[in-house]
């Protein structure tokens, strides 16, 4: 089974994931091709001081809604499922390792150049990291959820077999899917490849839909969906059964499924779009959630 | 000493094993040279193009064990074009032709073809040990030949090689009568393995002490293997995903508890962190732990594991451990000598550790002597503190992901911080620098880094003076590699004789011109000055003022090499 990466990143629009208050930058690496000012994307402002003034445009456009192209490109989202060390990130300059020079190689997705041979990590290790980012989430998920399911470990062996471009710098492609939440008229898009695992996806979605961002208040006058966000449940844990909402997805066959049952890799290959559904509507799914609540687990689906 | 017969001297020399010491012995006088050379069994060649295999065989007729290095270090980072060279075949062919009694071969950054492995396997009846590090060019077919034909093989150690995997049949090529395996490491292989064959191989290898599995080896097999090999000293776990509530898991826990000899643990290429407590029983004995390929182990599970490892001397981890996690290491691992912290997501240009983690480690682990640290930022104050806490550094490699980043607090260059390191660590042999750095740091290095042998520079310095300080000051310098720094002909040509006292010099994206390189090559006939030009510029040859993209020069007794590809031009 080959991982279908959404057609190799063909689903690119310039929307953004949010940034949590701690500065855990989960940003889309996609730039829209043309700098079309008229386009009103649902972008969210960040603490602008965190970025170098590579884009002078940022300074003049602080009053408007920012989109992905206003922020430093070439910063791909983290596949790491940790948010525990994000305190260091807020202090640090959130600059990507992008440095200048004639040696720059353009990333295939149009993001700005990355320097050849930097950071100085052995090519073998780099390649492993790319391959592992996909399968690690599968195992992490399995370990937490799959206790009573007697599923033997599903190893995404095809990933391991595919020797991706062993000698060249390889930048990860994106896989954006739509996300809609009940009660909110305007949907969002989230990069599943940026999440890398269910936990990160849940966190991203929680940040997107359930947590109002202070900077937005300062920067945007009013928007109906924003008010709704504030009014929405304050519960920070979207997907562990304690929230009023459940996360579901539509698969290739058109069925709506609860997110989290299958290994991450399998999920990626069958998901078409996501929906954050009110629990009351997700009838028939409740028993499983109750079962999950009985187990000690952190914020996972 | 002249009155001792040769056999006595030889016997005395037998106690001298390190290559360096033996080299020193051989320079004392002619008879010592003769005796030493005729008795030396183990040879280390740092640059396979520095000498011809024939010459090595001629000088060391008793040769049994050889280590060879091929490509320059920056080849690890894709800075050396793919077809540059470093072929092992001519060496094996020469050894075979001259009937060298080869028993051990250790290669690093070389191109190893299946033909080479086949020839190797057929030519040396007593061949015992093959170690390949960061090599490429071979497939599992070559490994099959080794398995089938090297009946005395004790060690097959494959570290971080790019191997084309034709699936798992190579393991089956070990004969049923092959019972001498001591060490087997195939963690870097990507393909499937015949698990039954593996289990039987382990079962008939009573001397097996080191086993590193690849990702295709699942939990069940691990459990069975450990049951059979309680005497393992070094274990690399392949896939470690299972249901902690199952019977197999319980069996594994039992098996692990019996493995009282395990001192080194690595792998966990796929991992279910909840199953890690099974290993807690052997953690207190561990001296080496490598979790740098296990991004699945993070946060609480990681620190829980580390808290059990009080005797750790070597630790390789990913930066997702964070500064806080490093504090745990600092308070737990008092015997720590070597630490490597790799970025878990290099593409994002973001590391999860900062100067704080490094300072914590330095204050908690006074025995630390080797460090490789990828981090988000650094400060002079931190480096000065580290230098004070750990004056025993031998290897200090710091990599800030943004290579020209200044002191995160003062925005100053990091000259003073690194200066403190070289000033305090008198025994420093290897140094890699990053961050905003001016010529000043090189002044310090030239002044204080008296034992420095290898220096890696990237995006640093202001002028030729920087490089000149280093060449002038570091008397023991052997390898110098520089990229993207403003050093030009003035520095290159300042002391051309120095390069014969060094193994090699690499300069890429610097200011040296073709003319400068030509001048150097002309003055120093015993250096190979290689220019690499991948851009198909035919005019290149005629324009001396043209800047050279990549230059690699090295001393050699073998003259210009004959296997250089088109884009490599030896001046």
Image: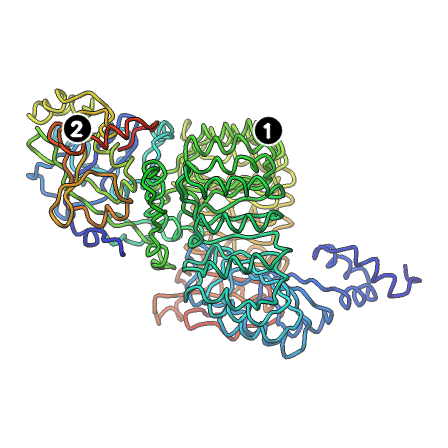
Q: Is residue A221 left or right of residue B152?
A: left
- Label ID, residue A219: none
Q: Is residue B124 above or below residue A24?
A: below
Q: How is the image coloured?
A: rainbow
Q: Are marks 2 and 1 on the same chain?
A: no
Residue found at x 29% / y 49%: A172
**Res. B556 image quadrant:** bottom right
Q: Quadrant of the N terminus of chain B?
A: bottom right
Q: Is residue B273 above or below residue A8?
A: above
Residue identified by numbered label 2: A245
Residue identified by numbered label 1: B388
**Res. B80 image quadrant:** bottom left
Residue B204, image x, y percentages: 60, 59
Residue B349, image x, y percentages: 35, 41
Mark 1 surroundings within 10 Å by alpha-carbon count, few (fewer than 14), some (14 through 19), many (20 or more) = some
Q: Secondary structure at mark 1?
A: helix
| Residue B403 appearing in the image | no
Calculate the distance from the C-alpha at mark 2 to the C-alpha at mark 1.
54 Å
Residue B86, image x, y percentages: 51, 67
The outermost residue toward the bottom is B97
Total number of numbered labels?
2
The outermost residue toward the right is B3
Q: Chain of mark 1?
A: B
């Amino acid at each position: 089974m080959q991982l279908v990466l959404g057609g190799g990143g063909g689903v690119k629009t310039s929307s953004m994931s949010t940034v949590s208050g701690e500065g855990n930058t989960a940003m889309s690496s996609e730039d829209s091709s043309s700098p079309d000012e008229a386009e009103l994307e649902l972008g969210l402002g960040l603490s602008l001081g965190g970025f170098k003034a590579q884009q002078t445009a940022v300074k003049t456009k602080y009053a408007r809604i920012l989109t992905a192209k206003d922020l430093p490109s070439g910063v791909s989202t983290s596949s790491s499922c940790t948010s525990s060390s994000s305190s260091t990130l807020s202090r640090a300059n959130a600059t990507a390792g992008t440095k200048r020079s004639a040696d720059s190689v353009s990333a295939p997705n149009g993001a700005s150049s990355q320097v050849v041979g930097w950071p100085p990590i052995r090519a073998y290790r780099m390649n492993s990291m790319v391959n592992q980012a996909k399968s690690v989430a599968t195992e992490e998920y399995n370990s937490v959820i799959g206790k009573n399911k007697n599923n033997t470990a599903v190893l995404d062996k095809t990933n391991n077999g595919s020797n991706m471009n062993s000698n060249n710098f390889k930048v990860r492609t994106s896989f954006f899917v739509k996300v809609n939440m009940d009660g909110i008229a305007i949907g969002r898009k989230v990069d599943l490849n940026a999440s890398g695992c269910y936990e990160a996806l849940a966190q991203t979605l929680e940040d997107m839909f359930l947590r109002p961002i202070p900077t937005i208040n300062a920067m945007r006058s009013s928007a109906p969906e924003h008010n709704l966000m504030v009014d929405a449940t304050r519960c920070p844990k979207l997907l562990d059964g304690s929230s009023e909402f459940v996360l579901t997805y539509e698969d290739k066959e058109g069925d709506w499924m609860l997110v989290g049952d299958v290994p991450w890799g399998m999920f990626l290959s069958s998901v078409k779009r996501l929906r954050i559904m009110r629990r009351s509507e997700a009838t028939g799914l409740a028993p499983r959630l109750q079962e999950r609540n009985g187990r000690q687990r952190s914020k996972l689906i | 000493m002249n009155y001792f017969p040769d056999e006595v001297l030889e016997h005395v020399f037998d106690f001298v094993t390190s290559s360096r010491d033996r080299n020193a012995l051989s320079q004392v006088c002619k008879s010592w040279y003769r005796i030493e050379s005729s008795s030396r069994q183990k040879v280390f060649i740092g640059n396979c193009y520095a000498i011809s295999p024939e010459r090595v065989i001629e000088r060391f007729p008793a040769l049994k064990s050889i280590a060879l290095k091929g490509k320059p270090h920056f080849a690890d980072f894709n800075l050396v074009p793919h077809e540059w060279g470093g072929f092992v075949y001519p060496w094996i062919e020469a050894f075979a032709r001259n009937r060298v009694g080869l028993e051990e071969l250790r290669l690093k950054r070389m191109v190893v073809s299946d033909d080479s492995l086949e020839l190797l396997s057929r030519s040396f009846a007593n061949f015992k040990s093959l170690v390949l590090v960061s090599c490429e060019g071979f497939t599992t077919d070559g490994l099959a030949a080794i398995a089938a034909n090297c009946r005395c093989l004790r060690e097959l150690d494959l570290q971080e090689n790019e191997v084309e995997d034709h699936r798992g049949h190579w393991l089956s090529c070990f004969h049923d009568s092959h019972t001498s395996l001591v060490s087997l490491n195939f963690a870097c292989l990507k393909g499937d393995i015949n698990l039954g064959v593996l289990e039987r191989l382990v079962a008939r290898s009573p001397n097996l002490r080191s086993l590193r599995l690849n990702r295709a080896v699942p939990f069940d097999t691990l459990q069975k293997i450990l049951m059979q090999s309680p005497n393992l000293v070094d274990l690399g776990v392949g896939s470690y995903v299972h249901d902690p509530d199952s019977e197999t898991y319980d069996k594994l826990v039992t098996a692990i508890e019996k493995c009282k000899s395990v001192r080194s643990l690595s792998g966990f290429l796929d991992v279910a962190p909840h199953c890690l407590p099974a290993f807690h029983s052997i953690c207190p004995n561990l001296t080496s732990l490598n979790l740098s390929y296990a991004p699945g182990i993070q946060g609480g599970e990681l620190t829980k594991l580390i808290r059990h490892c009080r005797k750790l001397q070597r630790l390789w981890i990913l930066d997702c451990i964070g500064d806080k996690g490093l504090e745990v290491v600092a308070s737990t691992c008092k015997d720590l000598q070597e630490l490597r912290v790799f970025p878990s997501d290099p593409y994002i240009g973001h590391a999860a550790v900062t100067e704080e983690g490094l300072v914590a480690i330095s204050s908690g682990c006074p025995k630390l002597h080797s460090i490789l640290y990828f981090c988000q930022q650094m400060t002079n104050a931190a480096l000065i503190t580290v230098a004070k806490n750990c004056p025993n550094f031998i290897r200090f490699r710091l990599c800030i992901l943004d290579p020209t980043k200044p002191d995160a607090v003062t925005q100053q260059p990091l000259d003073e911080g690194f200066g403190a390191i070289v000033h305090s660590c008198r025994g420093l042999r290897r140094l890699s620098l990053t961050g905003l750095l001016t010529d000043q740091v090189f002044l310090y290095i030239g002044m204080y880094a008296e034992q420095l042998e290898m220096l890696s520079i990237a995006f640093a310095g202001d002028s030729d003076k920087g490089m000149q300080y280093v060449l002038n000051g570091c008397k023991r310098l052997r390898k110098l590699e520089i990229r993207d720094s403003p050093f030009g002909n003035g520095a290159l040509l300042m002391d051309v004789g120095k390069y014969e006292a060094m193994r090699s010099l690499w300069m890429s994206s610097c200011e040296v011109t073709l003319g400068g390189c030509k001048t150097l090559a002309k003055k120093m006939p015993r250096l190979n000055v290689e220019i690499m030009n991948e851009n198909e510029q035919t005019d290149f040859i005629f324009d001396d003022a043209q800047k050279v993209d990549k230059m690699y020069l090295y001393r050699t007794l073998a003259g210009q090499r004959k296997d250089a590809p088109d884009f490599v031009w030896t001046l």
